[in-house]
Image: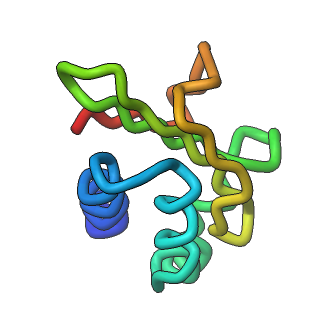
């Protein structure tokens, strides 16, 4: 699990300055990460809403991105801002890069 979170953080951090949220989602979906998230059971733990929320906030700037990760580990929605105001701390994640 720790390896998966480090991979997610690295992917977001690298792409936070390089493009928009859809670019991040495309890179995420093209990686091995979705399969690993399903295999570990992480993707299925979504609090019953059908997806997990991953937000990345770029410290010291107005940049942010939000992805919705479905039960198959795929990013199904991407936003160039933090859309979800109240995260479920049991299943959702907010990272600062």
Q: Where does residue 13 sit, x and y in percent of width and height?
A: 26, 51
Residue at the limit of the structure toward the top, as seen here: 85
Q: Can residue 93 be seen in this view?
A: yes
Within the image, what quadrant is residue 94 found in? top left
Residue 38 sits above or below residue 65 on the image: below
Q: Is the image coloured rainbow, by chain, by secondary structure, or in one colour?
A: rainbow
Q: Is residue 1 visible?
A: no
Q: Which residue is drawn at 73% across and 48% down?
A: 51
Residue 27 sits above or below residue 88 on the image: below
Within the image, what quadrant is residue 34 found in? bottom right
72 vs 39, left or right, is right
Q: Where does residue 95 sit, x and y in percent of width and height?
A: 33, 36
Q: Which residue is drawn at 39% across and 37% down?
A: 56
Q: Quick one: 47 or 79, which is closer to the camera?
A: 79
Quadrant in the picture for the C terminus: top left
Residue 14 sits above or below residue 65 on the image: below
Q: Where does residue 77 sit, x and y in percent of width and height?
A: 71, 50
63 vs 24, left or right, is left
Residue at the limit of the structure toward the right, as seen here: 49
Q: Which residue is drawn at 60% across and 14% down?
A: 85
Q: Residue at x 21, y 25 (%)?
A: 59
The total number of labels drawn is 0
Residue at the limit of the structure toward the left, as seen here: 60
Quadrant in the picture for the N terminus: bottom left
49 vs 97, left or right, is right
Q: Quick one: 67 or 46, which is closer to the camera?
A: 67
Residue 41 sits above or below residue 81 on the image: below
């Amino acid at each position: 699990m720790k390896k998966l979170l480090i991979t997610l953080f690295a992917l977001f951090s690298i792409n936070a300055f390089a493009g928009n949220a859809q670019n991040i989602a495309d890179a995420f979906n093209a990686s091995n990460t979705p399969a690993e998230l399903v295999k570990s059971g992480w993707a299925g733990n979504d609090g019953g809403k059908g997806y997990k929320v991953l937000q990345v906030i770029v410290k010291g700037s107005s940049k942010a991105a939000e992805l919705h990760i479905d039960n198959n580990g795929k990013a199904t929605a991407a936003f160039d801002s933090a859309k979800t105001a109240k995260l479920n701390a049991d299943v959702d994640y907010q990272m600062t890069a």
